[in-house]
Image (tube, rainbow, N blue to C red):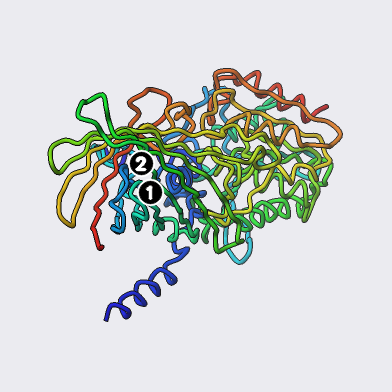
Amino acid sequence: MKRKYLWMLWAGLVVSAGCLRLDSNLYNASGIEAYQLDDYQGEVIFRLPDQYDIPADKIHLFTLQSGGYTIWAVYVGDTNRIAADTVILYCHGNRDHLDHYWERIKLLANAGGKLRYGVLSFDYRGFGLSEGTPTEEGMNEDADAAVQWLKQRGLTADRLVIYGYSLGSAPATELTAHPRTLKPAKLLLESPFASAAVMVQDAALLAMPPTFFTNLKLNNADKIREVDVPFCWIHGREDKFLSDSTHGRVIYERYQGPYKEAHVIPGAVHNNVPQVWGYDAYMAAVAAFIQR
Amino acid sequence: MKKQWKRRLDQRLGAVLALLVGLVLWRCAPVRQVAPLPEGSTEVRASLGGPLIHFAGAVMPIPFMSLGLDHGIRERLTVGGTIYPTAWLFGAFQVDAHALYGLRAPGDRWWQPGVSAGAALNYTIDRWEWQQGLWPEVDLNVWWPAGAHAVVYAGLSNWFELKGRRAHDQPQPYHWIWNPHLGLRWGGGKWKYQLEARALAPFAPNDEVVVDYVKPWGRRGAAGVYFAVFRRIK
């Protein structure tokens, strides 16, 4: 009888082995019934003064098809001028949905002057109204679907700039290192993470393999070595979540492309760099990098 | 309050990642014997506990589990091993092998405590990519009898990271992770119980760890509470 229970215990352990993984915790998506943008009353990190408002006729909410899913996107600018404009593709972080990042999108749409650049952002599958479940490859596919949408409207590679914030640094770096539809002309990363391995090791203090807890392959620190377009790194000096020294700086130092610049902002944490830096200074730096 | 707690976690990337990664190894190191077992005797133990966190308006330890077996092979020497079911749930098979040596028995005075030293090897391998890790550990304990069936003890658990480099060939910042502890062991006959409080890595900044730990020492370290049951089987 004892042996029977031991076998049952052993079988239970074998069956349950690996039933917990932390991969899905990377995504902090939440669903909504409708996008509200300026009317969004949920939690945001900062709200811009009225001077940054975007005229309603320059805000375009639409859907894309990506990997069999319908995902939602917003384009800020004149869709008829995509064939001539420079466009920033903004890959947002892991929080909520587009509404949460709307203030940031507006800020970019004011960089270099109001509507100087078109800005396209989108909800990864599983975020906001986008269908599906977030995955690492799904984020890349969704970002590339957005690039395809731009290409169909006449955007060329030399006018595509990718901006990745936090989680969004993964698809931004991937599509720059390994372009699928268009090769971006420039890459900006704000508060990026180096890799799943660094996240694990920062938390554990030990140099342990990330595979003990996650199957995520996120690895901006290695992929940045394959990026050969100009690169701008922005990070909060006081970022206690993704440390500028163990995450962002590792990426920055491993970049081997033609031009790089860094903006490490004193007093800023993970999610408030534009606010602490100052909106004007932030927008000026972004515009200067794009224009150089 | 619960919603607020959840939001705090949700606000940050990979919150649970950090939570569990930080615990499954050295932070959930089991409660072990502090005094050698009598020669020839064997005990099994189950240890439950972890760092204290704020949850739903209350303070509670995260319940991580280990199961172990200890055997007194000499009068002063006890050896044993431990498995970690919590790690196994993640597909990481974590075990340790350890030995405890009694350096001296307690004297009649309070300033003459029993002293013991332990050494352990902690090994983990995952079933996904067969990545491995090995971490040596050295423990030091002093203990005092408290009545006929109880022991009060204090000590220092020390984990060592032998690798000089970590991911992306960056320097490994920590090589010695020390955790002071204070505990009480009681019980007679076949069953014994042990309650232990630990200061977890009190040297390490805790504001880069996303979990809402109880932080009695400000911006460094965390506090943990552990409970173990021992049963003599031989």
Q: Is residue A113 above or below residue A126?
A: above
User: Which numbered marker is on residue B132?
Assistant: none
Q: Which residue is at 53% across, 37% downward?
A: A205
User: Could you say where residue A29 lies in the image, as x and y percent from the top left?
Assistant: 47, 49
Taking the image as drawn, is residue B37 in sight? yes
Q: Pick whichever of labels 2 and 1 is earlier in the sequence.
A: 1
Taking the image as drawn, is residue A35 in sight? no
Residue A191 is left or right of residue B146, and the answer is right
Q: Residue furthest right?
A: A258
Q: Which residue is at 24% across, 58% downward?
A: B232
**Subunit bearing disc 2:** B
Q: Mark 2 points at which residue?
A: B102
Q: Are marks 2 and 1 in contact (CB under 8 Å)?
A: yes
User: Could you say where residue A96 lies in the image, as x and y percent from the top left?
Assistant: 47, 45
User: Could you say where residue A189 lies in the image, as x and y percent from the top left?
Assistant: 67, 36
Q: Which residue lies furthest to the left in this view?
A: B147
Mark 2: which amino acid? Gly
Residue A263's image quarter?
top right
**Subunit bearing disc 1:** B
Tell me the element at label 2. strand
Mark 2 to mark 1 CA distance (whole Å): 7 Å
Q: Which residue is at 67% across, 24% downward?
A: A283
- For the C terminus of chain B, give its image quadrant: bottom left
Total labels: the figure holds: 2
User: Could you say where residue A245 lies in the image, as x and y percent from the top left?
Assistant: 63, 29
A262 or A43: which is nearer to us?
Answer: A262
User: Which numbered marker is on residue B77?
Assistant: 1
Residue B216's image quarter?
top left
